[in-house]
Amino acid sequence: MSRKTLRIGTRASQLALWQANWVKSCLEQRYPDLEVTLTKIKTQGDRILDVPLAMVGGKGLFVKEIEEAMLRDEVDIAVHSMKDVPTVFPEGLALRCITEREDPRDILVLRPGVATWRELPQGARIGTSSLRRKSQMLHERPDLHMLDIRGNVETRLRKLTEEDLDGVVLASAGMKRLGFAARISEYLAPEVMLPAIGQGALGLESRVDDAEINALIDFFNHSETAYAVTAERALLRHLEGGCQVPIAAYGTVSGDQVRLTGLVASVDGRQFLKKTLSGPVAEAQALGVSLAEDLLVMGADKILNEVYQHETFNRDREDV
Ligand SMILES: NCc1[nH]cc(CCC(=O)O)c1CC(=O)O
């Protein structure tokens, strides 16, 4: 092997560093002679912490600066949480591998003494800045108060006490990777809380023409996860949604079939469109598109238009 060094570009958050270090150790284990370095890169998503993500707008908030570093040949690969990766890539870069999925579910950390969110009193206060999470909890419990909280996993856990909340919603994958599994009060089944597109999986992005690097990282790809996430992302792309709209999709593979459930809802959870389709894994992409089409026919276009108008309204107000 001629290549001596592989440079990973990563965000500096604890979770991003855990993920990049995990990729680093897998690479070192497989290629004992390879030197793997980490370069920390600050993204716009790390800078803007005081505004709910839905109001910041723009896709790829957590990846753009890392992609620029890859295009300048300062780093070779980027490790992303798949749920933060846009569906379209800059010229010259592509998503090369999707790793095996961690637990895709969302979880709740509840105030001490509470076992399930179903026993929370009327008007209980739940922290999350995800429109997808707000919408699905409000769909079942319209009385809940969903409050915006931003920041990394630890900050959000701290806000449970600091802001006197009854619960916070987080991804199981992040909690487990960071060693906070013991703090999980309740797992939310995908039937109750459909996960974010790509949740739990990591994506490795690289330069399309860098054959040497691509050959080194290809073993990370987990084909079942890749089929499922491909279907989920095809749905997202067809609906032209970013992570700032209440869209969710979750695919599971069994044998040569992928089963995909998609959701488009209003933020208040009153309009709520959900549908499941199955098809061969070889047509995962087409399945995502068909499900998106079905949801649009059911009325998703109307819901999405309302959400986008609301966002623009808020963004304009921020500027004044
Ligand atoms: N939005 C931030 C984010 N991006 C990825 C994860 C961890 C889960 C994953 O890897 O899918 C999290 C934290 C969370 O949502 O609780």
Image (tube, grey):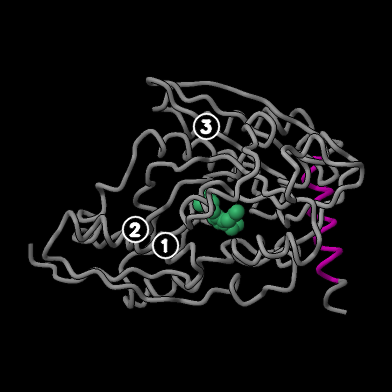
Residue 125 spot, x, y in % from top left: 84, 52
Residue at (78%, 54%) from the top-left corner? 308
Label 3 vs label 2: CA separation? 24 Å
- Tell me, for residue 18, which label it has, or none: 1
Residue at (84%, 65%) from the top-left corner? 314
Image quadrant containing the C terminus: bottom right
Q: Earlier in the sequence, mark 1 or mark 3?
A: 1
Seen from the viewer's position, the closer of residues 319 and 305 is 319
- Tell me, for residue 22, which label it has, or none: 2
State which quadrant residue 235 falls in: top right
Q: Mark 1, mark 3: which one is toward the viewer?
A: 1
Callout 1: SS: helix
- Tell me, for residue 183, which label it has, or none: none
For disc 1, the neighbor class at 10 Å (few under 14, some 14 to 19, many from 20) is some
Q: Which residues are magenta?
A: 302-316
Seen from the viewer's position, the closer of residues 1 and 175 is 175
Could you tell me the amino acid type at mark 3? Gly
Residue 64 spot, x, y in % from top left: 51, 69
Q: Is residue 185 left or right of residue 128?
A: left
Whether the residue under disc 2 has CB within 8 Å of ligand 1? no
Q: Are marks 2 and 1 in contact (CB under 8 Å)?
A: yes
Q: Which residue is mark 3?
A: 251
Could you tell me the amino acid type at mark 2? Trp
Callout 2: SS: helix
Q: Is residue 306 magenta?
A: yes
